[in-house]
């Protein structure tokens, strides 16, 4: 558990370590030479449906999901990522808005839909999900491919039609309704995952992109492991487990066993190991404009216990749209919850890994210059239309964390020790237009159990 005395003591160590934590970091890393592997992690990009719809045969001339302003903003953000010269880019979920089983404007861009649980309604929705995925996911992957950015994605809640408000155990309900409104998302989860896999983990011929995956489980096309430069292993997991009673949040059963084997295998090779999943496992952490999905058991979850026992080093997750680094105990894994909701801001984590076990994390934010009050980026759910214009300026480093073989050596700003009672770094919504007033940030995330 975090205590205020412990928080202050840790902060004090960083304060007396040198004239500045940043200077100490740069001096240490310079002595290590160039990194052996560099990654960028940017969960929740876009968290919106972004693609040009005007070429579709069903195009009706209405609001598009793309325009020149979003193109310029995307160029600015991905230019900043490309400038890091990463060997890989990780996106831990929420690449889209994804509410493709609804069509509140009845435009039928992706076909007619119905929220019933009968087979006719479900078949219509499956068709719409497939066509929407082909449009938005194809645009998404092309953005990275055109820039020579190798993409390694995980599945998020928006890839399975987005969660809804309520208790964590009821975000995808088999009841067929949500607050009295017809809702068939639960019955479409498996199809939505398959559509995502068609664009991220399967080739056009249907063959798996990654050989190391939990074969024989429900997650064999949404979880995978990859080694980089003989120094780093990424284990990507699917934290959405559909059961008869709903969708469990976490990693369980066959996928959990597979994950443990992959972590042990990587540690035997001397690799730094990061697990990538969409939702936080432990707290406390910052939360901004999010449904705050998380593993309800916290440190007692099967997932976190497995990370500790197998020696995983980092857990990279998104969902909460702000950045916090948490290490619940000495030599435990470091969870870095981060990412953004693109309509309000853009951020990314740069990781540099050396073969001697040293890791440097840098958290970057691109401040938003402006955002229009006018909505102009279409989503199949009218409630999720995005601003017509967004624009960003140059990136700013907002936190660093240096780690070596399980020990956090120093940390600053947003990657520093998080004290929910005294936090000056929480992200806030930017002004609307150029002169509007910023709105306050919402609640903090839950503390670990």
Image (cartoon, grey):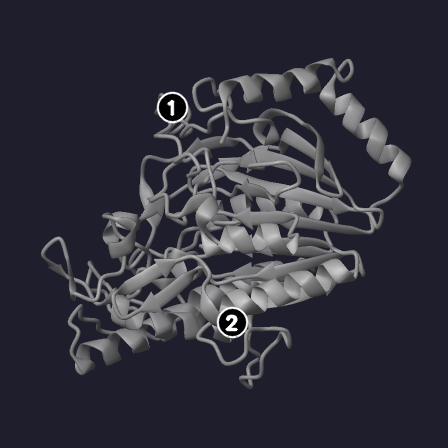
The image shows residue 284 at horizontal and vertical percentages of: 46, 34
The quarter in which the C terminus is drawn is: top left
Circle 2 — which element?
Answer: helix
348 lies above or below 20:
below
Label 1 Cα neighbours within 10 Å, binned few <14 / some 14-19 / many ≥20: few
The image shows residue 328 at horizontal and vertical percentages of: 55, 37
The tag on residue 95 is none
Question: 266 left or right of 323?
Answer: right
Residue at x 59%, y 36% (from the top left corner): 329
Q: Which residue is mark 1?
A: 438
The image shows residue 22 at horizontal and vertical percentages of: 74, 24
Residue farthest toward the bottom in the current orientation of the protein: 205
Question: Sequence-wise, which precedes: disc 2 or disc 1?
Answer: 2
Please identify the quarter of the rendering in which residue 32 is found: top right
312 lies above or below 441:
below
Residue at x 23%, y 63% (from the top left corner): 102
Q: Nearest the camera: 193 or 438?
A: 193
Q: Is residue 36 visible?
A: yes
Q: Nearest the camera: 194 or 273?
A: 273
Q: Is residue 281 visible?
A: no
Task: Give the mark count.
Answer: 2
Question: 55 left or right of 17?
Answer: left
259 lies above or below 304:
below
286 lies above or below 439:
below
Question: Rounded to the nearest whole Å, what is the CA distance between mark 2 and mark 1?
Answer: 37 Å
Label 2 Cα neighbours within 10 Å, binned few <14 / some 14-19 / many ≥20: some
The image shows residue 222 at horizontal and vertical percentages of: 50, 69
Q: Which residue is mark 2?
A: 199
Please identify the quarter of the rendering in which residue 128 is found: bottom left
């Amino acid at each position: 558990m975090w205590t205020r005395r412990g928080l202050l003591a840790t902060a004090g160590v960083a304060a007396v370590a040198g004239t500045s934590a940043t200077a100490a970091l740069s001096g240490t890393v310079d002595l290590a030479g160039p990194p052996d592997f560099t990654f960028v992690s940017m969960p929740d990009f876009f968290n919106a449906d972004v693609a040009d719809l005007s070429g579709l045969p069903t195009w009706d001339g209405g609001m598009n999901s793309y325009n020149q302003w979003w193109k310029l903003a995307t160029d600015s953000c991905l230019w900043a990522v490309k400038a890091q010269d990463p060997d890989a880019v990780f996106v831990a979920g929420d690449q889209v808005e994804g509410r493709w089983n609804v069509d509140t404007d009845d435009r039928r861009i992706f076909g007619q839909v119905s929220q019933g649980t009968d087979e006719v309604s479900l078949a219509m929705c499956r068709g719409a999900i497939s066509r929407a995925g082909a449009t938005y996911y194809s645009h998404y992957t092309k953005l990275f491919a055109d820039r020579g950015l190798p993409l390694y994605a995980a599945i998020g809640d928006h890839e399975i039609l987005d969660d809804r408000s309520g208790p964590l155990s009821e975000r995808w309900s088999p009841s067929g309704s949500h607050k009295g409104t017809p809702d068939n998302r639960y019955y479409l989860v498996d199809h939505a995952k398959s559509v995502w896999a068609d664009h991220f983990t399967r080739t056009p011929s249907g063959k798996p992109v990654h050989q190391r995956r939990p074969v024989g489980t429900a997650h064999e096309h949404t979880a995978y492991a990859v080694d980089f430069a003989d120094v780093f292993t990424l284990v990507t997991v699917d934290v959405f487990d559909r059961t008869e009673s709903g969708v469990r949040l976490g990693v369980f059963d066959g996928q959990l066993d597979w994950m443990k084997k992959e972590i042990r295998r990587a540690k035997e090779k001397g690799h730094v190991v990061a697990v990538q999943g969409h939702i936080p496992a432990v707290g406390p952490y910052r939360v901004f404009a999010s449904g705050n999905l998380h593993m309800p058991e916290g440190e007692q979850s099967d997932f976190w216990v497995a990370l500790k026992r197998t020696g995983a080093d980092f857990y990279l997750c998104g969902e909460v749209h702000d950045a916090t680094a948490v290490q619940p105990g000495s030599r435990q894994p470091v969870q870095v919850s981060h990412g953004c909701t693109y309509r309000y801001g853009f951020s990314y984590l740069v990781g540099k890994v050396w073969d001697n076990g040293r890791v440097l994390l840098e958290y970057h934010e691109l401040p938003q210059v402006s955002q229009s009050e006018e909505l102009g980026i279409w989503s199949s759910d009218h409630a999720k239309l995005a601003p017509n214009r967004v624009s960003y300026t140059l990136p700013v480093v907002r936190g660093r964390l240096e780690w070596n073989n399980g020990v956090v050596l120093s940390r600053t700003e947003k990657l520093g020790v998080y004290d929910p009672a005294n936090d000056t770094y929480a992200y806030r919504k930017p002004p609307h237009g150029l002169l509007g007033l910023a709105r306050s940030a919402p609640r903090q995330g839950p503390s670990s159990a």
